[in-house]
Amino acid sequence: SSGSGDAKALKVGTNADFAPFEFQGEGSDEYQGFDMDIIRAVGKEMGVNVEINNIAFDGLIPALQSGNIDIAISGMSITDERKQQVTFSDPYYDSGLTAMVKADNNDINSFADLNGKKIAVQIGTTGAEEAKKIPNAQVKEMNSSADTFLELKAGNVDAVLNDKPVNDYYMVKNSDSTVKRVGEKLTSESYGIALKKDNTELAAKINEAIQKLKENGQYNEIYKKWFGTEP
Ligand code: GLN
């Protein structure tokens, strides 16, 4: 943690509503998750304090561009479109999209079955983009992945499309027998830490720090803590 007067502190933006990557634990303001552990370890490696700012997911890139934050770590997939707006670190986590439906839903057994269905997604995400490509789908854009689960449980949509590790964590954490996962991954995506387009110097330092964490075993330790396995 840090003081707000710390000029050297790394100003980090995240959308802390995306377990197990970034979230606020019950009864605690401390930001938790895989990304939070990674970025704190990166800060340590670089010898700087890390200041976490909780920002809407679709506000992260604008916050980088205006200089309000130095970096964004938020389960953000590296995409060609985003690469035109920001610089990404080397990939640090492999992800992709999966769908979930109600447990008693027998007509959606694959991605093809999502045609013409109501699908909840998080606004500004790759899930939202993919859902919009599904023929005749009615896409409902929510503020968070947590809201997509609520929408599904309420019966307002037929399916949700979220990052696989987020859907998987929801299932394990909530042992929710009213919903189930469908199909393999629809996409293969990698998460990167985003920076202002011209901030390649800091990007190089971050890549170096991540590489160190991979070499000294800390990356694996953090991975195991949140996903239960080695990467
Ligand atoms: N990985 C997805 C994306 O980059 C979702 C990220 C998120 O919701 N935090 O769009």
Image (tube, grey):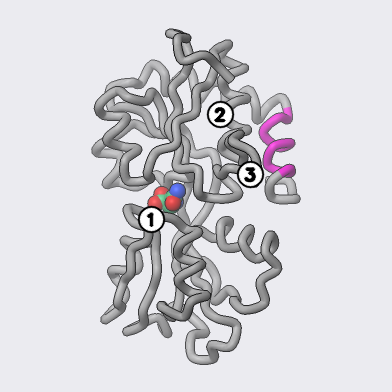
The N terminus sits in image quarter: top right
Query: Which residue extends farthest front?
Result: 27
Q: Residues within 10 Å of mark 1 (few under 14, many from 20)?
A: some
Mark 3 beta carbon near ligand 1 (under 8 Å): no
- From the viewer's perspective, is 170 left or right of 158? right
Q: Is residue 169 left or right of residue 108?
A: right
Q: Is residue 229 visible?
A: yes
Q: Give the residue drawn at x 52%, y 84%.
A: 109
Query: Which tag, 2 or 3, sits closer to the chain's start?
Result: 3
Residue nearest the viewer, comparing 151 with 90: 151
Mark 3 burial class by Cα count in 10 Å: few <14, some 14-19, many 20+: few
Mark 2: secondary structure = helix
Q: Which residues are magenta?
A: 217-225
Q: Position of residue 42 (x, y in %)?
A: 58, 23
Q: Amino acid at mark 3?
A: Gly
Q: Which residue is denoted by mark 3 in the rendering?
A: 25
Among the 4 quarters of the image, the one containing residue 215: top right
Image coords of residue 177 (percent x, y):
67, 77
Q: Which residue is mark 2?
A: 39
Residue occupying the point 36% across, 28% down: 195
Q: Position of residue 191 (x, y in %)?
A: 48, 44
Quick check: marks 2 and 3 in contact, CB under 8 Å? no
The answer to whether 184 is drawn above or below residue 5 in the figure is below
224 part of magenta stretch? yes
> From mark 2 to mark 3, how far is it between C-alphas?
17 Å
Kindly report which numbered mark, 2 or 3, lies closer to the viewer in this rendering.
3
Q: Which mark is residue 143?
A: 1
Q: Earlier in the sequence, mark 2 or mark 1?
A: 2
Q: Nearer the viewer, residue 56 or 210?
A: 56
